[in-house]
Image (cartoon, rainbow, N blue to C red):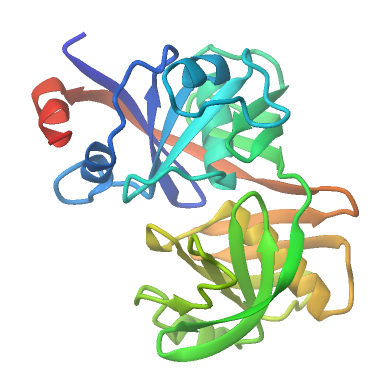
Amino acid sequence: MSGVAFVKGHGTQNDFVVLPDLDAALSLTPSAVAALCDRRRGLGADGVLRVTTAGAAQAAGVFDRLPDGVAAGDWYMDYRNADGSLAQMCGNGVRVFAHYLRAAGLESADEFVVGSLAGPRPVVLHSADATTADVTVEMGKANRFGTGTAVVGGRSFSGVAVDVGNPHLACVGLGESELAALDVAAPVSFDTQLFPDGVNVEILTAPVDGAVSMRVHERGVGETRSCGTGTVAATLAALAHDGADTGTLRVRIPGGEVTVTITESTSYLRGPSVLVARGELAEPWWNAAHS
């Protein structure tokens, strides 16, 4: 092979470069990941999904010990944000990761487990072909851990702090027109005591007819067209806004629509995946990107 194989895919337009690397042999330095995700000097993406196993990732030094509940033989989604930082979880990424495994002939089961830094994420492939898939991910229990504030687009918001394997602040209450006009791409400020490692901020409407609209500013990335864990956090906050602890909502994001279910013990995210291209990174470019 003359270069590094890749696949480009997205889940509701939250887009990723998928790097098949079963032995976890590739060096994923922050500078190389950032270059790859740059939309002018690289392929462009919201993040990178390395396809490997948990045992291989451990042997390569991605982590010292296996994440709780993840076995060495499990598939492992080694996810990096666009700035090159490690991320615990990405719900849209899990859908694309699972779709890739089926499309590449690496996984024939309709139900299997994808490991992550946040732990195991069981998936169900309802349908999948070489290009499109419909996937449900069990995201685990979404836990509230207080309330916080953030400034987004020059406006101050209060919201619910939610742990979905990564931290979120979900703020309910804007109208559709106000949400559309908000500058979510601008840098955000937030309560660093509550979120010492940063936070993903969701701004959303109150539920109407079983649906909400949401925009998100992801830590390490900026505004994205969708955020899977963010839709889970937003659903929990929207249900709480209506006085409910459990339920199902459709979540409209700029990149499409997903369905989220919150139960007493776990949460589920169902939505599409699309694989749009495959190819090779030029080896000299990849090597230079590490410097």
- Which residue corresponds to the image point at 10% horizontal and 31% vertical from the top-left? 288
Choose between 4 and 63: the one closer to the eye.
63
Q: Residue 18's spot in the image, x, y percent?
A: 40, 31
Q: Horizontally, is 194 left or right of 84 in the view? A: right
Choose between 95 and 143: the one closer to the eye.
143
Above/below status of 255 relative to 42: below
Kindly tell me whether residue 177 is visible in this rendering: no
* Quadrant of the image containing the N terminus: top left
- Which residue corresponds to the image point at 47% horizontal and 91% vertical from the top-left? 155
Q: Horizontally, is 59 left or right of 40 in the view? A: right
- Which residue corresponds to the image point at 31% horizontal and 31% vertical from the top-left? 28
Kindly tell me whether residue 74 is visible in this rendering: yes
- Which residue corresponds to the image point at 55% horizontal and 44% vertical from the top-left? 88
Above/below status of 166 relative to 189: above
Q: Horizontally, is 25 left or right of 43 in the view? A: right
Q: Quadrant of residue 222?
A: bottom left
Q: Residue 183's spot in the image, x, y percent?
A: 39, 81
As drawn, the residue found furthest toward the top would be 1
Choose between 279 and 265: the one closer to the eye.
265
Q: Quadrant of residue 232?
A: bottom right
Q: Horizontally, is 228 left or right of 210 in the view? A: left
Q: Residue 55's spot in the image, x, y percent?
A: 55, 15
Q: Residue 204's spot in the image, x, y percent?
A: 61, 76
* Quadrant of the image containing the C terminus: top left
Choose between 230 and 30: the one closer to the eye.
30
Marks counted in the figure total 0
Above/below status of 150 relative to 220: below
